[in-house]
């Protein structure tokens, strides 16, 4: 099922055939799955195929009575998140290097298309520099804001998300650049102990890498787009599916696809039948998304109400081996709407460093990097346990709202894309039980 960047379904014939099939044969569990960032149609099909292979293998080893799941995978325009080409090029992989360059070119063309010719020319000059001083970085950040404003001018502010200003872009850019330079190991919890200002980065001789700007800019854009896509057509189809199956809909989202599906669960206020379950795989959003209150505020987390709109407790994976979410997300996504001021946390007691995700390094930490947390104190309804092996039951408690599944031990989740495996498939199969 294809959706455009505003969430409109562009697969009307496929949708009609799907709903007609369920109308005539409703005795199916429905798996409704959204991919995450930097995934085109072919990438989505590949990701879904790998997950289904793992699911079929686990189901064969642990057969459930009369289960005939119907899989519905969606695609949405999420390619606009570039990984930093530097490490890929240094790896000597020419295919990865070429793909990274193509991603950067696509992003710059999208940005330039929204700007007046003079600004577009200047964008290419600044983005093509090897390094920028504070003045050049400021100028590029302003052009980025202009592009975002132009792209979202017709969108509803309530679903669009808060747009960053140039200062927010510079701050996230500086933190991302400083974090990248401070360590190569997958633990940057010490970053944020001091206020890393743009001027400090430039004065230290590091300057600003334009590729980090492109990466950061795409994170802002994709994070907000995911909410729009989910709240619109994806939410509508979810309501159609829940109304037609007699077994229930099991919602799955990976990375920013988790935000798509969380927004879909909230998106239809008139939905009469709840989805049966929700599985978030390495979700790229705030670890405080389900919190009762946010720091320095009386406001609840943006998705606080989601667990009450799903039959079973929400399951959400996390892993210290997910470098984008464990190491960098909290350095980049630092808008006012992305929670609050930087605070430093330490590793929790109770296990070797490679067995747990550790404590969130600051208030911007990712759910997929550190698991669900409440504020100011942890609560029993938001807790994290080890991701179990296939065959071992998930330890569920009365009152659970969200259960984090930590895949750090033995690298059960070995990276951001490492979610198609027996452990995650087993979690989904248990939700169907």
Image: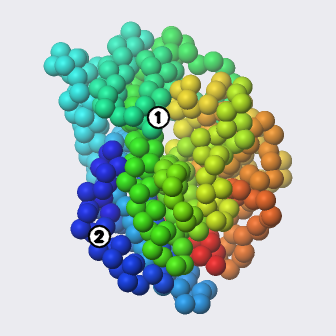
Q: Is residue 201 left or right of residue 120?
A: right
User: Label for residue 67?
Assistant: none
N-term mark: 2 or 1: 2
Q: Which residue is nearer to you in this view: 68 or 272?
A: 272
> What element does badge 2 sit on?
helix
Residue at 22%, 33% in the rendered image = 109
Query: Mark 1 Cα within 10 Å, few/some/many (few <14, many 20+)?
Result: few
Q: Is residue 423 left or right of residue 332?
A: right
Query: Could you give the CA–CA distance between mark 2 and mark 1, rounded to whole angstroms?
Result: 30 Å
Does residue 187 sit above or below 411 in this rendering?
above
Instruction: From the top left corner, tell me how far across and down residue 68 is, in percent.
Output: 48, 85
Does residue 360 sit above or below 242 in this rendering?
above
Query: Mark 2 Cα within 10 Å, few/some/many (few <14, many 20+)?
Result: few
Instruction: From the top left corner, tell me how far across and down residue 83 is, in percent.
Output: 40, 42
Q: Is residue 431 left or right of residue 98?
A: right
Instruction: From the top left corner, tell me how far across and down residue 265 is, in percent.
Output: 52, 55
Give the labeled residue for mark 1: 158
Classify residue 215 by image quadrant.
top left
Q: Which residue is nearer to you in this view: 390 or 397?
A: 397
State whether residue 35 appears in this view. no
Give the labeled residue for mark 2: 16
């Amino acid at each position: 099922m294809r959706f455009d960047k505003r969430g409109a379904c562009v697969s009307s014939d496929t949708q009609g055939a799907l709903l007609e099939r369920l109308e005539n044969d409703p005795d199916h569990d429905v798996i409704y799955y959204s991919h995450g960032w930097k995934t085109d149609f072919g990438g989505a099909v590949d990701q879904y195929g790998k997950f289904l292979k793992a699911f079929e293998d686990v189901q064969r080893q642990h057969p459930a009575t009369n289960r005939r799941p119907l899989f519905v995978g969606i695609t949405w325009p999420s390619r606009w998140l570039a990984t930093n080409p530097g490490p890929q090029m240094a790896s000597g992989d020419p295919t990865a290097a070429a793909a990274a360059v193509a991603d950067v070119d696509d992003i710059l063309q999208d940005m330039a298309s929204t700007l007046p010719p003079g600004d577009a020319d200047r964008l290419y000059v600044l983005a093509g520099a090897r390094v920028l001083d504070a003045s050049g970085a400021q100028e590029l950040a302003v052009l980025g804001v202009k592009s975002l404003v132009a792209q979202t001018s017709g969108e509803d502010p309530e679903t669009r998300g808060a747009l960053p200003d140039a200062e927010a872009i510079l701050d996230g850019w500086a933190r991302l650049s400083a974090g990248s330079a401070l360590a190569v190991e997958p633990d940057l919890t010490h970053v944020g102990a001091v206020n890393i200002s743009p001027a400090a980065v430039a004065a230290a001789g590091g300057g600003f890498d334009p590729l980090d700007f492109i990466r950061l800019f795409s994170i802002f854009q994709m994070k907000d787009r995911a909410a729009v896509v989910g709240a619109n057509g994806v939410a509508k189809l979810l309501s159609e599916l829940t109304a037609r199956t007699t077994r229930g809909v099991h919602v799955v989202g990976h990375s920013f696809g988790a935000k798509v599906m969380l927004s879909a669960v909230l998106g239809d206020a008139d939905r009469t039948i709840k989805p049966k379950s929700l599985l978030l795989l390495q979700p790229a959003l705030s670890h405080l998304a389900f919190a009762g209150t946010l720091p320095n505020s009386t406001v609840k987390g943006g998705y606080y109400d989601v667990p009450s709109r799903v039959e079973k407790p929400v399951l959400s994976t996390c892993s210290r081996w997910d470098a984008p979410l464990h190491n960098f997300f909290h350095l980049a996504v630092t808008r006012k709407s992305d929670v609050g001021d930087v605070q430093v946390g330490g590793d929790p007691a109770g296990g070797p460093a490679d067995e747990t995700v550790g404590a969130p390094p600051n208030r911007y930490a990712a759910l997929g990097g550190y698991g669900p947390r409440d504020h100011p104190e942890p609560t029993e309804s938001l807790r994290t346990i080890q991701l179990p092996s296939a065959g071992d039951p998930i330890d569920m408690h009365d009152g659970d709202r969200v259960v984090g599944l930590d895949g750090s031990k033995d690298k059960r989740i070995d990276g951001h894309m490492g979610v198609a495996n027996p452990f995650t498939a087993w979690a989904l199969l248990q939700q169907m039980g």
